[in-house]
Image (cartoon, helix red, strand yellow):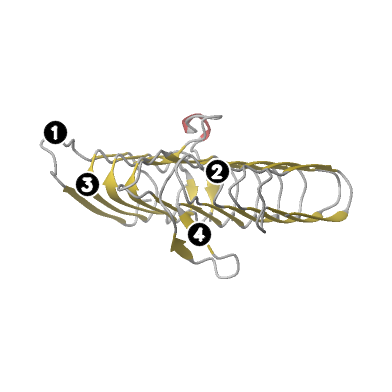
Amino acid sequence: MNKKILLILTMCILTEQVYAQDNVLTMTQQGDDVVINSLQQGYNNSIDVDLGLSGLDASNAFEVKQYGNDNDVFLSIGGTTNSLSFYQEGAKNTIGWTDTWGSGLQWGGDLDGDNNNIMIKQYTDTGKNIADNYFGFHIQGDNNNVKGGQGHFINSSTGSYSQAQGWGDHYMRLDIHGDNNDVITTQRTDAANNGATAYVNVYADLNDLYVQQRQGAHTLNLTINNDSNDVWITQAGQPAHTSTITLTGAYPTDLTVQQGVHATTTAQTYTLFQTVKQKADAVLV
């Protein structure tokens, strides 16, 4: 039964150039107590959200704020009590499906889970020679508490955001299939052509994960196939560091990886495939 639906939609088109295109909001919703608060300021911004695709919705909340040009959000969602919030400032920021999975319409939503509480912030500085930011996620799980930042730094202890350099060119694919994960991912850079790439695949429950990539064109390929791991990864500095990490097996792992946290002119590479209970620390300076 639909109890309450509140829609607050604000669109402002800034006509700095006569050929500026309209902002677009496309929405199909169903379910209980849906609250949607969207603001678009600029031009060529688009929001495409379906919500309620599984038919089991209750108390969803969805907020998007877009300040600038050529920003996109496209989702499907589904599930109950999701409370998603997205903030895009600048230009060429995208939040949506992973390019691996595409749209999640066929299984009821690109999120399709309960009580997820997702927050993603993206920033590019339109005064710079910027490239696209792309943040994709699939999830299909419960109680994930995911926070993502591209062009923003997220404090690991407080979870607070601070705006960083806005060159863009970051890519994040976040694909969680499990419950109660608590994930923070933050990517920022100090120069053009230094965007970071992260593939974070979490297919199990109760993992606590913090990923930070800054300054250089770093790449992280992380897959977690088992429960209750505590993972902390930092890649920093101008050389392009690379980490490939797979955690699996019957026991959890406490993992800390730090690459380039001190001044270095050499790109570091770290590879780990772990199947046993262990504490693993790697500091590559």
Q: Quadrant of residue 47?
A: top left
Residue in view at x 55 percent, y 47 percent = 113
Residue 19: numbered disc: 1
Residue in view at x 65 percent, y 56 percent = 263
Say which residue label 4 marks: 153
In three-dimensional space, the C-alpha distance between marks 2 and 4, rounded to whole angstroms, equals 13 Å
Say which residue label 2 marks: 196
- The 10 Å Cα crowd at callout 1, few under 14, some 14 to 19, many 20 or more, is few
Q: Secondary structure at mark 3?
A: strand
In three-dimensional space, the C-alpha distance between marks 1 and 3, rounded to whole angstroms, equals 12 Å
Say which residue label 3 marks: 42
Mark 3 or 4: in front is 4
Give coordinates of residue 181: x percent, y percent.
65, 54
Give coordinates of residue 174: x percent, y percent.
57, 43
Q: Quadrant of residue 101?
A: top right
Asked whether the viewer can see residue 202, the reply is no
- The 10 Å Cα crowd at callout 4, few under 14, some 14 to 19, many 20 or more, is many
Q: Are marks 4 and 1 in contact (CB under 8 Å)?
A: no
Give coordinates of residue 34: x percent, y percent.
36, 53
Q: Are marks 1 and 3 in contact (CB under 8 Å)?
A: no
Q: Residue furthest left?
A: 18
Sequence-earlier tag: 1 or 3: 1
- The 10 Å Cα crowd at callout 2, few under 14, some 14 to 19, many 20 or more, is many
Q: Is residue 168 left or right of residue 266?
A: left
In three-dimensional space, the C-alpha distance between marks 2 and 1, rounded to whole angstroms, equals 33 Å
